[in-house]
Image: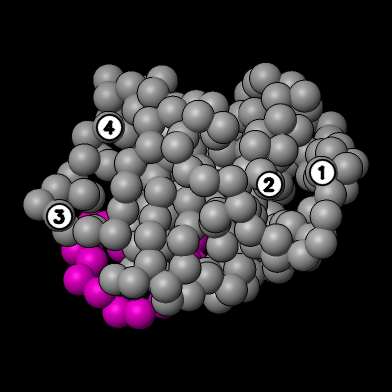
Amino acid sequence: MPAAPRAPARGARDAGRRPAEVVAFLGIGSGMTVMDLIAAGGYYTEVLSLAVGPTGKVYSQNPPRVLQFRDGANEKALSARLADGRLANVERVNEQDLGATGVAPGSLDAAITALNFHDLYNGQGPEAAAGFLVGIRALLKPGGVLGLVDHYGDPAQDNASLHRLDVAAAMPLLEASGFGIASSDVLRNGEDDHTMRVFDPAIRGKTDRVLYKLTKPTEE
C-alpha cells in the first residue's frame, strides 16, 4: 500500500488490522475500482483510497442506519475522513440495497467487508447473508474479488451476542455463493479463545480473524 499522509489517530488500528497485508492478499492495486461494504466510519475506505491511488475509485457504502449508530458516530467519523477533499477518489453511497447504489453491474475490480458479515449472518439470518453475497457478486467484474474479514467464533458459544462468526457453519453458504474461496492466516491470533465479546477490553482490536478472498469466476 503506498505511503500517504495518515494522522497517527487514523493509523492507530493498523497493528491489529494489518491493512497492507490484507490489500496485498486481495490483489488490490493502483487504478482499480473498489467498494468498502458497510464502511461504518471508513477505516477501510481510507485504506482502499490509498491503495488504488489517484487513478482509482472507491465507493464507500453504508446503509443509512449504520451511519446513525452510537449517536451518529459513524457519520461523524466518515465525514471527518473525507473532509476538505482529503480522499478525492472516494464517493459515498448511502444505500442498503446494493442493486440501488447506482454502481454499474460488473464494474468493480474488488470489494471488502470487514467485521460485518457476522451481523448479517447472526442477526438477519443465512438468507440475508446469502442475498448480500449475490448483490456484491453482481457488481464485481468477472475475476473480481470480495475480501471478507470477520471475528472467529466458537460453535459452542452464542456468537450473536459475542459478535463473532461460526466460520464452519457459514462455509456451506459461502461455497454455495459460487465464488472461488482462498484464505489467509495473516489476521490469526492464537491467544483469542473465541469466548469473549469482541468489545471486551482484553481482546478488542486483537481478535482472531478470518480473511477470505472470494473470487467471482471469469466465466459464468
Residue drawn 15% across the image and 55% down it: 85
* Picture quadrant where residue 62 is located: top left
Nearer the observer, 9 or 81: 81
Identify the secondary structure beneath mark 2.
helix
Disc 3 to disc 1: CB gap under 8 Å? no
Q: Which residue is rendered at x = 50% and y = 29% of the image?
A: 100
Return the residue found at the far left.
Answer: 84
Q: Residues within 10 Å of mark 3 (few under 14, many from 20)?
A: few
Quarter holding the N terminus is: bottom left
> Which kind of residue does numbered mark 1 sit on?
Ser
Residue 151 seen in this snapshot: no
Rounded to the nearest angstrom, the CA distance separating label 1 from label 2 is: 9 Å
* Residue under pointer 1: 177
Q: Give the structural element (helix, strand or loop) at label 1.
A: loop
Name the residue located 27 percent from the left edge and 42 percent from the top edge.
78
**On residue 85, which mark appears?**
3
Q: Residues within 10 Å of mark 4 (few under 14, many from 20)?
A: many
The tag earlier along the polypeptide, 3 or 2, is 3
Range shown magenta? 1-20
> Mark 2 or 4 closer to N-term?
4
CA–CA distance in space, label 2 to label 4: 26 Å
Q: 131 or 47: which is nearer to us?
A: 131
Q: Position of residue 35 (x, y in %)?
A: 48, 51
Q: CA distance from mark 3 to mark 1?
A: 37 Å
Residue receiving disc 2: 137
Judged by depth in the image, the label closer to the viewer, 3 or 2, is: 2
Q: x and y percent of residue 189 in the render?
A: 64, 61
The numbered mark at residue 191 is none
Q: Amino acid at mark 4?
A: Glu
Question: Mark 3 falls on what kind of element?
Answer: helix
Numbered label tally: 4
